Amino acid sequence: RENMHKALQGERISHEAEFHGHWFEYQYSPVYDEKRQVTGITLAALDITLLKNSIVQLEKQQHFLETILAAVPGGVYIYDTIHNANI
């Protein structure tokens, strides 16, 4: 309700929330008439579950790699054989 009130005051609001195991990005936008008066709002919801799950997996991989690199007593050399380049 707070986001609806802000949109009715002319503010554009965006936030993310989890609902029954799915993540959504909600966008509240004011609707104006020809006199630039707010006459209502629109609400759009986008399912961003795949994005959120991908971020969690990347964070886990980063933590795993950081743990391995912290445990190595020497240096680590990484070479990209696909691009033939040092990383």
Image (cartoon, grey):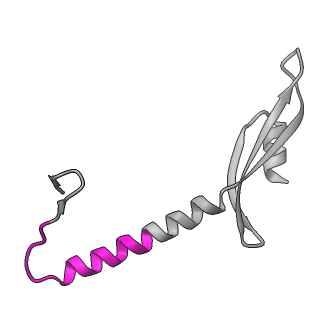
Position of residue 69 relative to residue 30, above or below, is below
Total of numbered circles in the picture?
0
Judged left or right of residue 14, residue 74 is left
The residue shown at (28%, 80%) is 67
Residue 63: x %, y % from top left: 36, 75
Task: Tell me the magenta residue range.
Answer: 59-77
Residue 85: x %, y % from top left: 16, 52
Query: Residue lying farthest top?
Result: 34
Q: Main secondary structure of the magenta part?
A: helix
Judged left or right of residue 21, residue 60 is left
Residue 50: x %, y % from top left: 61, 61
Q: Which quadrant is home to the C terminus?
A: bottom left
Q: Quadrant of residue 18?
A: bottom right
The residue shown at (80%, 40%) is 7
Query: Residue lying farthest front?
Result: 82
Camera-side residue of 40 and 53: 53
The residue shown at (89%, 21%) is 33
Query: Residue lying farthest left?
Result: 74
Q: Quadrant of residue 28?
A: top right
Q: Which quadrant is home to the N terminus?
A: bottom right
